Image (cartoon, rainbow, N blue to C red):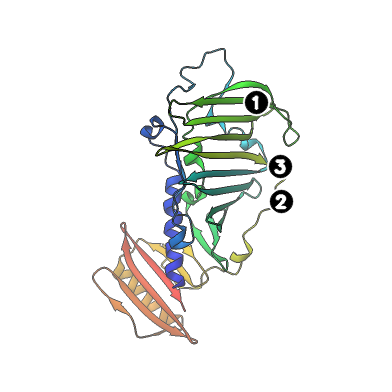
Amino acid sequence: MKFRFMIAVFLMSVLVGACGNTPAPAEQRDTQPETAVQSDTEQSGEPQTEPTVAVSSEESTSSDSAAADVDVWTPDSYYDNLQLLDSYTLTFTYKVTMNGKEETWTWKQSTQSEPEITLSTWKTTQSGDDAETALVTAADKTYMVSGSPKTCIVIANAEENKNVFNPELILDTFAYDLVAAGAGPEMNGRATDTYTYDNTLADGTSYQSTVYVDRADGLTMQWDVSGKNKNGDNLEPFAWTYALSDINAVPLLDVPAECTSISEAVWPQPADAMVKMQTPEMYMLESAGSVADTAKFYSDAMQKAGYTPAEGGMESAEMVMQMYAKDGSTVSVMISPSEGKTVVVITQS
């Protein structure tokens, strides 16, 4: 059961990561403002997809139409100049009402440059239930901690997982430039300038936005967006806030405590193997060898390591499962093809 849970969460993370790296479709920008939180927490306890937002381009002030002498802030600059900082925290909070029920999605990411580590947390609130997932990316590994009690999964050699649970899918669809509106408040000890946008369509849907930009370094200190969406005959509110804090003051980040008990695997592995995922009970790797050659490798290597073949193994044209026993524990080795490579999943119980 634990193994099935781990695989489900891993596949979820890859799916969400892919969504986080995908630009918003062009047709999404051409519709009326709509927001919706899409999640599957009822089935797995973890959000399966990110909230999505589509923004109307009608009656908007775009970079193409803005007058040349008007000082504007463009939405694609919200990440500008973060590389100038030694460390920082970004927080994104999104609230939407759908059919009278309010749902909240919160994403928080702390980043430090030396050593390079990123901590991200994702939390949804639905019907009073909270579910949080935390990810720490360090070197070539992503550590994912979730569930109750907290369980760690190590996702190795997975560059795409650095953007898991990223709010870019929402932020990148905001299609309006904001116009300068004078000096803003001091934030984190920095003087800011204010930029605003306000638009209401004929059907009542609306979009209001204010951004505060660091005057010296051009950092986006806070970006607030709110409005109302048309849902049938009703207008329902939504709002999000993107904020920068802990500038050069993030406490030292490290691997989550729940993951420190996961040591480097002691299982045999082919010379060309690349470890993909690891938990306290499971180890997954990828090899270029054939299923038959990999099965032969494990048949020899496991017995040399002191494991005795046990009942329960099976073999088909596409998959081999080997069972072994040692010191009162049972180990399964499942070998199968995947996209031109061979995947090995070793589970101990």
- Say which element carries label 2: loop
Q: Residue type at mark 2?
A: Pro
**Residue 46, relative to residue 112: is it above or below?**
below
Mark 1 touching mark 2, by CB under 8 A?
A: no
Q: CA distance from mark 1 to mark 2?
A: 29 Å
Nearest-to-viewer mark from 3 and 1:
1
Decide: is 258 above or below 244: below
The correct choice, above or below, for 197 with respect to 307 in the image is above
Question: x and y percent of residue 176 in the render?
Answer: 50, 26
Residue 251, label in figure: 2
Q: Secondary structure at mark 3?
A: loop
Q: Is residue 256 left or right of residue 101?
A: right
Image quadrant of residue 330?
bottom left
Q: Amino acid at mark 1?
A: Thr
Pointer 3 with pointer 1, Cβ within 8 A? no
| The N terminus - image quarter | bottom left
What residue is shown with label 1? 194
Few, some or many residues within 10 Å of mark 3 (<14, 14–19, 20+): some
Q: Give the side of residue 55 with respect to residue 297, left or right.
A: right
136 lies above or below 64: below
User: Visible in this render: residue 274?
Assistant: no
What residue is shown with label 3?
Answer: 248
Type of amino acid under label 3: Asn
Estimate the x, y position of residue 24 in percent, counting from the top left: 41, 37
Mark 3 or mark 1, earlier in chain: 1
